[in-house]
Each structure stands twice: as structure tokens, then as C-alpha cells.
Amino acid sequence: MSEQWWQRAVVYQIYPRSFQDTNGDGIGDLQGVISRLDYLELLGIDAIWLSPVYQSPNDDNGYDISNYEEIMSEFGTMADMEELIAEGKKRNIRIIMDLVVNHTSDEHAWFVEARKSPENPSRDYYIWRDPVAGQVPNNLRSTFSGSAWEFDEDSGQYFLHLFSKKQPDLNWENEKVRQEVYDMMNFWIEKGVGGFRMDVIDLIGKLPDQEITGNGPKLHEYLQEMNAETFGGKDLLTVGETWGATPEIAKLYSNPQRNELSMVFQFEHVGLDQQEGKEKWDLAPLDLTKLKEVLSKWQTSLGNEGWNSLFWNNHDLPRIVSRWGNDQQYRVESAKAFAILLHLMKGTPYIYQGEEIGMTNYPITDIKQATDIETINMYQERLALGFAKEDLIESINVKGRDNARTPMQWDESANGGFTTGTPWLHVNPNYQTINVKQALADSSSIFYTYQQLIALRKEHDVIVWGEYELLQTPTEIFAYLRSLGDEKWLIACNLSDQSQALSVPKSKEIILTNYELTEVPVGEVTMRPYEAFVLKV
Ligand code: NOJ
């Protein structure tokens, strides 16, 4: 297969609610995104993954869609959306839509109809079951706590919702549902979008009666059908959100021979700081040896039969600099180290808004400050189970989704320049020092490291296509080689706040560093806290 545009691309994720408000209602909007396209062009990205902008009652901030072909009024209009696509095109930035088709909102017309009666022609668009011995049909749980079954008084049946009860699951076994989804996708393709990020796509083949949710038997059949009916052969980027994927599963999705998706998001590394077999809230320290093992396994096992997505952050995850870096003394160094570590790997990198300026988590002291449904439901459920308040707040501060969702910090003016109104979610008070304006004014800022990393990928085949080899080093140093033909690059990152020793037998040239280096490191090298460098060797 010849090279595809998305194999050399870097994608930037925008969470529109928190990106840029232009009308003073405290909520980001599409005109806000348009107004920042020049900034993104300067960064050098090729595509924007736009979190959902469709009509939604916002029970889960747009991941509960009530109309797939209308824009959320808080964000603007369809004309704004068309303008965004066109303005993006002018700057070679494609717009990747968030495709949320495992479920809709309960306010979607299909569900409003389906709920009317068991005989309604739309009833079978969703998943309904009778009570079993007067109880829920089975033990399936919602990701947002509690049973995944909600009782519908009128019909005496339960419907399935793997997320909130305002997000009923679509019944993918129904051919009409699939056709509706494909028609909607074609509507967006005709508008000129650059592809789709597919929300929890691993769940669409579920077998609820057998309590199977991810990786159901018909999943890949549906994706092949979707490919043929919509984006197949159209040069679009498609990326599936697939929580339980192993490399073998990732190949099923992304092997070009199979005509499914371009790539998937795998989450194995994301689970490395939680207690085994428990939930994300059950905290454990990160084991760096495991991080190396997991990422290296993904680097080496896909070969030509799949393609990686590379990411530390998104709107569901805490900020990497706070999570595994050091957001105090070594904020700049550690943010750059994690960027360098990831962006020199094989795959398509994703940057989440604010990551490029080293935005940090924003701890809360009381549950009243939380807005996210996942956090609030978990807190209530665990409190009732007897967990201590302080422990729950700690878990929320480490893992909660609001951390990544605080408004983008543009400058030192009120609310970080995000809004002139009252922001929908608190702005991190560190906006006075951490903001885009400062970053652009400082040639040694995190922003310029990201800019360089993106530019390097455009220029050097070794980053896109080179072989990957993990090096044996002290635990705290993550080092690997990329090689293509005669070209060999060494990437070394000290992921600790202590100096560490590394032996560099040979080196020719410095490609990139996050500390000032006066000469090319060679021999027994001392890496300073969070020091990272890329060397031609
Ligand atoms: C994954 C999305 O990234 C998350 O934000 C959302 O809550 C769930 N899917 C449900 O759509």
C-alpha cells in the first residue's frame, strides 16, 4: 500500500465547549474554532478531531446526540460548520467528526418514537427486554455507574444504556439502524469532512443477553459494511475508540486488506496506573517498566497489518504533565519529554487542546465543583458503599475527566481569554502564566517543541516508517532506536525528577532536545531530570 496522508499527519483534538467562546455565553463555539485556525496552522497540524458538535441536551457534553444533522445551538449553526470545513481546507486542515453511534440521546426522535409503545416501528432501533423475575434482565453495568438497564414504566420493559440513562444504546442488529447511520455519515462526507473518530465503536456488536459488550461477533462485519457504504475508497481518516483492543484485535480493525478503519485508539498504557482488575478510580503508581513494555509491544507488533494512534491525552483523561510528569518544578521539561517520547514513535500522533502549552490538571476540593456525569455518579455510588470522601476527591483529582476539560488558556486576560462571560467550567487559575500568548512569545516554550516534532515527521521517513527497537537502560530512562536504511535515530527520555546515567556508544548529531546542549551527547551521559534528546547515531 502506498503512503496515506494520515500516516504522516498529526491530529489536534478540540473539545469545542472549552476551546474558544466568541459570543460571551461562557461556552466555546464554532466561530471560536474558526478564529483559532491560524494558530493551529502555525502549530502545523493536518487535521482536527472535533468532539461532538451535534444537537444534544448535553447530559454527557454532546456524546448524547439528539440530531446528527443539526449543530448544537450553543456552538452555532450549520453555516458555521460549513465555514469551518472551508476555512480548514484553505489551511490544509481537515475536520474529523466524532461519530457517536453506539447510542443516541433519549431525546433523539428515534427514541422518542420508540418509547411510545412496543408496537412502534422505531421500537427495535433500541434494545428492550422484559424484566426477569421482576428485576433487571441481567448484571450489565453502565460505565457511568449502576445498572445498564433502565425501566420504562409505560411499557413495563427495560432499555439498555451502557452509558447514562439518557444515552440509550442503538440496536445494530437492526438493518434499518445501520442504514440510517450510513446515510448520516454520507451526509457529512458530502459536506467535505476529513473522516471520523468513532466513539466506543467496539461496543456496536454487543450481545446484551450474554453480557457481551466489547468485540461482539458481528462487530467487524458491521464495520466492513460501513466502510463499503460510506467512506471506503474516499481517502478519509477513520479511527476507532477501542478500549479493550490487543494488537491482534487492532489488526482486525486496521489491516488495510480488511477494509475497515485506518487505525484505532488502544488504551493499554492508559490503564497502567490503576489497581489490576479494578476501576480507574482505584489508584496505583505508574510502573515505568510496564509502560515501556506496553508501548514497545504496540510499536513492534502491528507491522504492515495495522496502524497505531499515538496519544497521552484526550477529553476523558487527566493531563499527562500532571499525571506522569511533574507539573510543578519540571512542568516544561516533563511536558516536552513526554511529547518527544511519543512523537518519535510509529503511528499517527494526536494532541489534545492545551497539551501543546503544558496545561495542567485542576484539583477540586469538593464534589460541588465537578460537572462530569461520570465523576458525579461514581462519587455518589462509592459514598453509599462507604468509601471515604477524601479518597474519592483524591481519585477525582488524579483521574477525573473535568481535568482535561477546563477552558483553553489563551492569554492572561480574564478567564484566560476563553470567554468574556462566565465560563461553563472553572478556568485553571494558572492561566496567568500558562497560556498561548506566553508560549508563542517564548522561543523555548513547549509549543515550539510540538511545532518541531510535527515538522520533523513531515520531513523524515525514519519517523513514519522506521523500525523500532527498545533499548535496555535504567528503569527511569525510556530509550529507543528508529532505523530506516542507513538512517538511525536514538530517542532517550529521562522520565524522573532525578539525574540518571545513560550510555550512548555512538552519536553524530543532535536533532532535538529539551535542555540546552553544548555538544552532542556521547559515552557515559548524565541525563538531567526529565531530560530528553533525539540524536542521529
Ligand atoms: C467515549 C467518549 O470519549 C466519552 O467522552 C463519552 O462519555 C463516552 N464514549 C460515551 O459516548
Image (cartoon, rainbow, N blue to C red):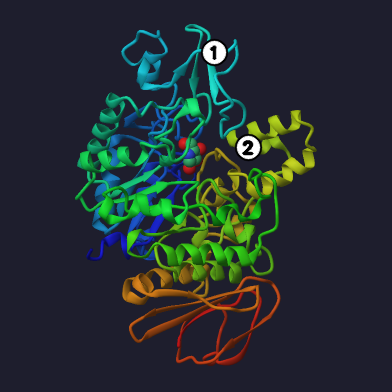
Above or below: residue 57 compared with residue 411: above
Closest to the observer: 23 or 486? 486
Q: Mark 2: which amino acid?
A: Thr
Q: Residue at x 40, y 40 (%)?
A: 201
Above or below: residue 371 compared with residue 469: above
Q: Mark 1: which amino acid?
A: Pro
For the N terminus, the quadrant is bottom left
Can residue 26 be seen at all in this image of the molecule?
Answer: no
Marker disc for residue 131? 1
Task: Determine whether, in the image, residue 456 is placed left or right of residue 152.
Answer: left
Task: Determine whether, in the image, residue 339 is placed left or right of residue 91.
Answer: right
The x, y position of residue 229, in whole percent, is 21, 38
**Mark 2 crowdedness (10 Å alpha carbons): few <14, some 14-19, many ≥20:** many
In the picture, residue 396 is in which quadrant? top right
For the C terminus, the quadrant is bottom left
Q: CA distance from mark 1 to mark 2?
A: 29 Å
**Which numbered disc flags the more N-terminal residue, 1 or 2?**
1
Task: Determine whether, in the image, residue 428 is placed left or right of residue 46.
Answer: right
Can residue 192 be seen at all in this image of the molecule?
Answer: yes
Q: Residue at x 65, y 73 (%)?
A: 475
Q: Which residue is mark 2?
A: 375
- Which of label 1 and label 2 is nearer to you? 1
Closest to the observer: 183 or 439? 183
Closest to the observer: 353 or 429? 353
The x, y position of residue 20, in whole percent, is 45, 47
Q: Residue at x 56, y 49 (%)?
A: 317
